């Protein structure tokens, strides 16, 4: 079974958030993941350990 690749893994806005969460582009990305269908697909297809890491790193508690 081939693993699906997501553009979320290489998202330039996500990189801005990772570098500086308080930057305007970082804040925009963080707001964006609340309604982005691509992020939902990416997030919900991760294993539970990765989901927990993403929740902690991005303070993201949707889709529990």
Image (cartoon, helix red, strand yellow):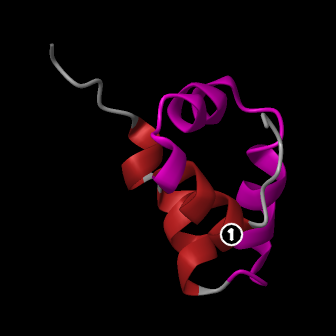
Judge whether residue 35 is colored magenta: yes
The C terminus, quarter of image: top right
Residue 45 appears left or right of 37: left
Where residue 41 sits, quadrant-wise, is top right
Which SS does the magenta portion mostly show? helix
Q: Position of residue 38 (x, y in %)?
A: 58, 28
Q: Is residue 25 visible?
A: no
Residue at x 68%, y 24% (from the top left corner)? 37
Location of residue 63 (image quadrant): top right
Residue shown at 78% from the left, 56% from the top: 60
Task: Give neighbour class at mark 1: few <14, some 14-19, many 20+ (Cα, 10 Å).
Answer: few
User: Across the whole image, how many numbered discs are drawn on residues?
Assistant: 1
Q: Is residue 28 above or below residue 2?
A: below
Residue furthest out toward the front: 48
Residue 32 seen in the current view: yes
Q: Secondary structure at mark 1?
A: helix
Identify which residue, 43 or 28, lies in the foreground. Answer: 43
Q: Is residue 24 above or below residue 45?
A: below
Left or right: 1 in relation to 41? left
The magenta-colored residue range is 21-49
Q: Which residue is the site of mark 1?
A: 56
Q: Nearer the viewer, residue 18 or 42?
A: 42
**Which residue occupies 78% across, 66% down?**
59
Residue 61 appears at what percent x and percent y?
A: 82, 51
Q: Position of residue 47 (x, y in %)?
A: 45, 40
- Give how far across and how far down residue 33 sits, in percent: 74, 45
When the figure is inspected, residue 35 is found, relative to residue 56, above or below; the finding is: above
Asked if residue 45 lies left or right of residue 34, the reply is left
């Amino acid at each position: 079974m081939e693993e699906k690749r997501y553009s979320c893994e290489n998202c330039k806005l996500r990189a801005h958030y990772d570098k500086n969460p308080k930057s305007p582009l970082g804040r925009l990305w963080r707001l964006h993941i609340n309604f982005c269908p691509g992020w939902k697909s990416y997030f919900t297809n991760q294993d539970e350990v990765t989901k927990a890491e993403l929740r902690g790193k991005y303070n993201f508690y949707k889709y529990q």
